[in-house]
Image (cartoon, rainbow, N blue to C red):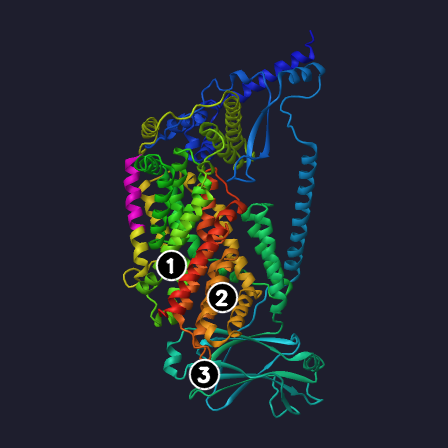
Amino acid sequence: MKVKAPAKRIFRRRVSKQSLDSYPKPNQVTEASLEIWRTLPAAIRQDPSLASFRQEHERLHGPDEDPLPNEDVSADDGDDSHSKEFITIKVTNPDSSVEDGKTTTVVAEQSEKNGQNMTTDGEGDDGHETTMGGHHEHGKLFGYIKIGTLLVVWLIFTGFLMSKHEKELTPRQLSVPEGAYRTYILPEPSLGPRIGINFKGAFLSDQHHNNTSTYLSVILQLLYLPSNNSNTSFLSEYDAKYTENITNVWLVPIPSSLDAIDQMDEMTRKHVFDIGPINHQKVTSGKAVVRMRLTTNLEADFPTKFTYDPTPMDTETGVIYAAIVLLGLYVLIIWEIVHRTFAAIIASTLAIGVLAAMNERPSMPKLISWIDVETLLLLFGMMILVAILSETGIFDYLAVYAYQVTNGKVWPLINCLCVFTAVMSSFLDNVTTVLLMTPVTIRLCEVMELNPVPVLMSMVIYSNVGGTLTPVGDPPNVIIASNSHIAKNGVNFATFTLHMAIPIFFVMITTYFQLRMKFKNINDLRFSEPQDVQEIRHEIAVWQRAAASLSSYSKDEDLVRETLLKKVNRLSRSLKKKLVTGSVPAESYKATLEEMKRKYPIRSKTLLVKSAITLAFVITFFFLHSAPDIQKLSLGWTALLGALLLLILADREDIESVISRVEWSTLLFFAALFILMEALSELGLIDWIGKQTENVILSVSEESRLAVAILIILWVSAFASAFVDNIPLTTMMVKIAIGLAENEALDLPLQPLVWALALGACLGGNGTLIGASANVVCAGVAEQHGYRFTFIEYFKVGFPVMVGSVIVSTIYLMFAHVVFTWH
């Protein structure tokens, strides 16, 4: 007997629905699939849809000590939707003024009549995805252009990296004798018209040019060869026809005594000599050779190590290439063409490819040395601590407590959060503060039915403002305060904090009013949909993220992935029902508070005590970091040791689940960004910014130089910090500030320049999403919780705040140091 086509479809649909709702049974769960299940976030592991995995885990390994409370969508949520079809499309939310451009999942329902027509006519099938023709074609075209462009970029840097060798310069030892000169003949085959000379030894910086009378003098000469001499290895001055100086003398300041040389740290000094095309032609034709001649007026022999670079990079061209690479990175991030981590990897690899094209390809050890392992250790250790601490339920509990203290009022709660974050960031590293505060803030916003994105933006802005207050609050301040020359000029912890306290106080007030004006409509802080609908959307995003992290590489992994996708489908049907029937908001503050107290208790007091012990250790040693005589641990080592201590105390068997909650994409983004910024520095971009800053200051009249110097350092460091990493920028600007202060012709005090640099570098980080480490960490943690804010969203809030903060700082510095000369 044959079955009619419509009946076949109905039968097939019922079978597929049964398959959709059926979760694996315990006897289907293998040990390998349990290993994959243990890597999922705790909230997903404890969901009833994965109960079979939980039961099998308890049967094999015993029950856990701290099971998480869980809720699930009622079983009948999707029952009356079985006869209807639904589709999922991505659209831009037009109603939210806070989340412009954010894509949300919208469930659309086709009419039953349309479905009947499709069944009767025998055309179409279940699960069709509705698209708008023109928009779909435009999206496909954009996708092809994106892939094509990235492929061209890949071919460019791959070609350069494949065709160029790593640049390795051979170091040579030499000693310049007292009262005589030392020469060294540079081999001619590979020399170009420009020759780079690098010295490493007991040298002084350029800032000491006016404070010393002892120099190493370096000059390049041309030795003309006799016609019958082709061997230059043993060529002496007496064998040459005559000698000609072809460059100016390079004076390198050195210590004035052997005792000072013994106490000096090793420093690298670089200089590029241009011998010109005519002299270069004489060398390549074999008529002459290039010789380096060194003399010193030190009353002793001067030892040093040097390398010569036969083909140094043209930094003028390098600056242009560096600007193009940096612009490309921001295009990728601002328009969200690719994920910011992938964008940073592409940009850093392209920068290395550009270096290779200019015969400056760095070696792998040099690339690794560019990565700030200290910062990555700090982030990794604190991420482990936060991951385990979140399992105790303390973040939920603190959110409920804050809700109770502020009586559920929005702005008092946001103010408390921001002020507390700013104070913590003043004494802890602001990255650590953000890692600890972001989960609490997200839970608070969920409790109060607020959109976490604008609240997190406000919090991280205050974190950067608070970190400016002390020398240990923000990495640029650490660089500034740890400089020995600055420390000798009276800048210590107390002086730094005192001079920063007044402008930061006014900046915090200005920032508060700016944020209140930005979000003057309280609805801008709320979701445009009811809370329960938004919660389901958020839960769908979290489950989709978990499913996307798994592949179909093995049957066990596929089993877990299919279970997660079934949960996503079930939630989608529940969302469709909510959109059709509507939802009921909470009736009162008291009812909501009682419900939250019942729903979010401390889940494991034992683990909380262990976490508190570890956190006390970490925070105590963070505070002691400013007193190196007491403890010798860096911030990174402290965070790592704290993470190891908590892992030992927690005695976790499923270490994979903890490791999987580390924000690896954020760590990889930082590593790529560190390499990118060092590559841009090698291309000359950072030095170019510094030289332009110095030239502008030197170009104005003497009575205006202090005001202009403060303005230039403040605003250049602020805008540059918003778009490039502020760590290499601060390192470069410190040298400029010291050089300006040491220049006797300018007669500028050092401290006002230091305060301008600290305010500009730290407050400038609020300008863009990648302007400060805390911003990137906050965005990464929020994305892990299912809340994503884009570069443009943050820019609309952070950049005006940054400009307002720098204007307030400008007014303060002008009055304090130009009008009243408080230095």
Residue 616 counted in the magenta span: yes
* Residue 302 numbered tag: 3
Rendered location of residue 320, percent (x, y): 62, 63
| Residue 208: percent from left, percent from top | 44, 78
SS label for mark 2: helix
Is residue 220 one of those drawn in magenta? Answer: no
**Image quadrant containing the N terminus:** top right
Q: Position of residue 500 (x, y in %)?
A: 36, 60
Does residue 664 appear to the left or right of 388 in the view shown?
right
Which numbered tag is attached to residue 712? 2
Calculate the distance from the C-alpha at mark 1 to the C-alpha at mark 3: 48 Å
Q: Main secondary structure of the magenta part?
A: helix
The first of marks 1 and 3 along the sequence is: 3
10 Å neighbourhood of mark 2: few (<14), some, or many (≥20)?
Answer: many
Q: Residues within 10 Å of mark 1 (few under 14, many from 20)?
A: many
Contact between labelled residues 3 and 2, with CB atoms less than 8 Å apart = no
**Badge 1 or badge 2: first in the primary sequence:** 1
What is the span of residues highlighted in magenta in the rendered image? Answer: 604-618
Q: Residue at x 70, y 85 (%)?
A: 287
- Could one spot residue 363 in this view of the protein? no
What residue is rendered at 37% in x and 46% in y? 418
User: As displayed, is residue 372 above or below residue 337?
Assistant: below
Left or right of 198 on screen, residue 610? left
Name the residue carrying label 1: 503
Residue type at tag 1: Pro
